[in-house]
Image (spheres, rainbow, N blue to C red):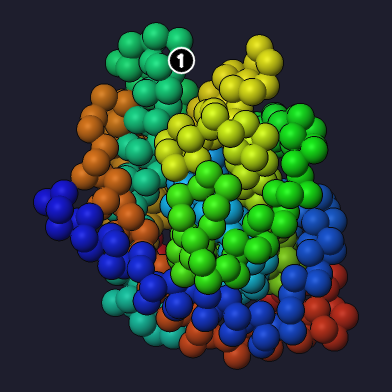
Amino acid sequence: MENFFSTLSSFLWGWPMIILLIGTHLFLTIKLKFPQRHIFKAMRLSLAKEEGKQGEVSQFGALVTSLAATLGTGNIIGMATAVSLGGPGAVFWCWVTGVLGISTKYGEGLLAIKYRVRNKRGEMTGGPMYALDRGLGMKWLAVLFCVFTALAAFGIGNLVQANSIAIIANDTWGIDTLYVSLAMSVLVALVIFGGIKSIARFCSALVPFMAVSYVGGCLFILFMNSAYLLESFELIFTSAFSPRAAGGGFLGSTIIMASRFGIARGLFSNESGLGSAPIIAAAAKTRNPVRQALVSSTATFWDTVVICALTGLVLVSSVLAHPDIDATQGATLTKAAFDKIPYVGTFVLTFGIITFAFSTILGWSYYGEKSIEYLGGLRIIPFYRMAWVLAVCAGGIMDMTLIWNISDCMNALMAIPNLVCLLLLTPVIVQETKYYLWDGRLDEAHRVVSSTAD
């Protein structure tokens, strides 16, 4: 089974998926007249008050909850793997992927609000499954998306993250993984049983704090490596387009390897096109689809354009500054870089990994919950939440090899229905964008959404 899912994962996340995702990013970027130019306006909107509007949480609450699910161990350890296998040029291609992915995240957020509905509890519910169902009449594809999302949620969003927390807590402080797992289960239960409002409140406090802490550590390392920053930038850009193997102590790589691993890491990290983030975007209090689309697009900016790029620059400059660091070992590359921070380096990295992973558990719990709700109704939700908490406990003591590969496969499979939805509904995305953004009606209220039966 491990061999089968490992082979399938390599195929699904190979060049066909990369081309499909990058192609969608480029297509939407052109059709939407480069929405990246509105990123600063989008940041201002993310902090705007939208009281009295339809929705469960604020635009900022929806954004940080989305970031909570997106910011995971992939931003830290995954970036190191991309650099060790693809060379310094992987940082450039990861950054480019993030810039282009802003357009896809924008389209996802717009459709989430456009086609969201109100469930029997009076809560706003949406995401690719409702866009596929209500916008395209493809209920069968909506069902497949929800099945893949629910499976991916328990894998990459739960078991894998819980295991990462348990292992690093054990390695760093010697705490038994069982005790760590039990403590995680209690904390997760306290948050998720309160629903999206509870998750958003917790993430609104945790995400900015954990992001600032991690970015602060990165900036300190860059300050220590300041003499090598110019050389790092030059190496990143030249390696990104080099037809020959990269030097400087990195594993020999060409433009093919740099783009392959950099693009793959960027796509996997920011989740643009995956279809997960719009599930949370649908719960936002907002005046119209375009406002939330703009806010949603900033998640990709913060995740890849800022945090992944900073991580990559830290890794490249650290290898240049400290030739004793083994750049070919992705699993230990980040740790070696942060160990150079006097006294607190290990703590900063450990805190970053634990908080990033824990926030991912919370964000993905909502993705899975809404997928289960679409498949079976509200009556299943209490049982789902109990299963989620139990899975957190189990994840801390399980072997993850098979789970990783299955989760990667489910992530790729859930992206396909979402990309179909985005491409077929591009005319709707363009029409809404023209009405609200290009024609200057960004403050206008959207019409009332419909209801749906449980």
Q: Residue furthest right?
A: 440
* Residue 396 visible, this angle: yes
Q: Is residue 21 left or right of residue 312?
A: left
Considering only vertical position in the picture, is 367 above or below 448?
A: above
Q: Position of residue 250 (x, y in %)?
A: 51, 47
**Which residue is labeled 1 in the image?**
172
Q: Residue at x 68, y 16 (%)?
A: 342
Instruction: Give the number of callouts.
Output: 1
Q: Position of residue 420 (x, y in %)?
A: 43, 81
Amino acid at the residue labelled 1: Thr
Considering only vertical position in the picture, is 221 above or below 384?
A: above
Q: Residue at x 64, y 71 (%)?
A: 100
Q: Is residue 364 left or right of residue 139?
A: right
Q: Position of residue 172 (x, y in %)?
A: 46, 15
Q: Position of residue 177 (x, y in %)?
A: 33, 17
Q: Residue at x 44, y 42 (%)?
A: 328
- Quarter of the image for residue 10 reads bottom left
* Residue 362 visible, this angle: no
- Quarter of the image for residue 305 reads bottom right
Q: Is residue 444 left or right of residue 123?
A: right
Considering only vertical position in the picture, is 454 above or below 395?
A: below
Q: Residue at x 36, y 82 (%)?
A: 138
| Quadrant in the picture for the C terminus | bottom left
> What secondary structure is marked by label 1?
helix
